[in-house]
Amino acid sequence: MICDAWTCLKAYTQIPGLEEAAAFLQTADTLPCGEYPLSGGNFVRIQEYETRPEEECRWEAHRSYADLQVILQGKEKIGWTPLEQAGEGQEYDPDGDIQFFKGNVKSSAVLVMERGVFALFLPQDAHRPCCADGCVSKVRKAVVKLRTGGEENL
């Protein structure tokens, strides 16, 4: 997991697809919600939702894509823990590239995400997005899905 200020994103452009994603995100504020293709099988999802109490949010992990999460408006908490500490997972869904986790997973770190900060979750990371930071917040977020090469890279 990488979490940093948006202004520092250029330090990570050696990650394949990140430079194109950063350029695309310059226009994300004006785009309607939906999915937008990038090159190399990468894509961006623009989402809007209200945050929820932590106990209502699910832990998840991905195998074929890394998640670059960028808050465009609002505020949310995202829990993070190493995948090996996430416990028992539900069956992996290869079509959605998602695996949810059962039970009470303990956060190793909690990120408070607002505009100006990004987080990159890799296949070895479990994360719990959409959590309220004290009170419910309407969030507008871009999630860039960066292809990692799939399960064989775990």
Image (cartoon, rainbow, N blue to C red):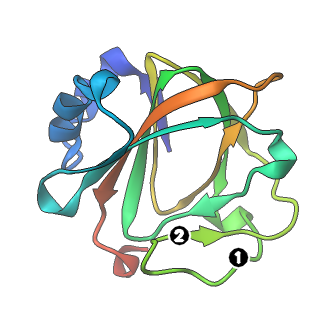
The quarter of the displayed image where residue 7 is located: top left
Q: Residues within 10 Å of mark 1 (few under 14, many from 20)?
A: some
Image check: 124 left or right of 8? right
Above or below — where is 141 with respect to 8? Answer: below
Residue that badge 2 annotates: 98
Image spot of residue 134 (x, y percent): 83, 22
Separation of disc 2 and disc 1 at Cα?
A: 10 Å
The answer, for residue 72, to whether it is visible in the render is yes
Q: Residue at x 72, y 68 (%)?
A: 101
Q: Is residue 40 above or below residue 79?
A: below
Q: Residue at x 70, y 35 (%)?
A: 51
Comparing 58 with 110, the one in front is: 58
- Say if 125 sits above or below 27 in the image: below
Viewer-nearest residue: 35 or 39? 35
Q: Total of numbered circles in the picture?
A: 2
**Label 2: element kind:** loop
Q: In this rendering, does residue 112 appear at all?
A: no
Query: Residue 49, image x and y in percent?
Result: 60, 37
Q: Which residue is mark 1?
A: 89
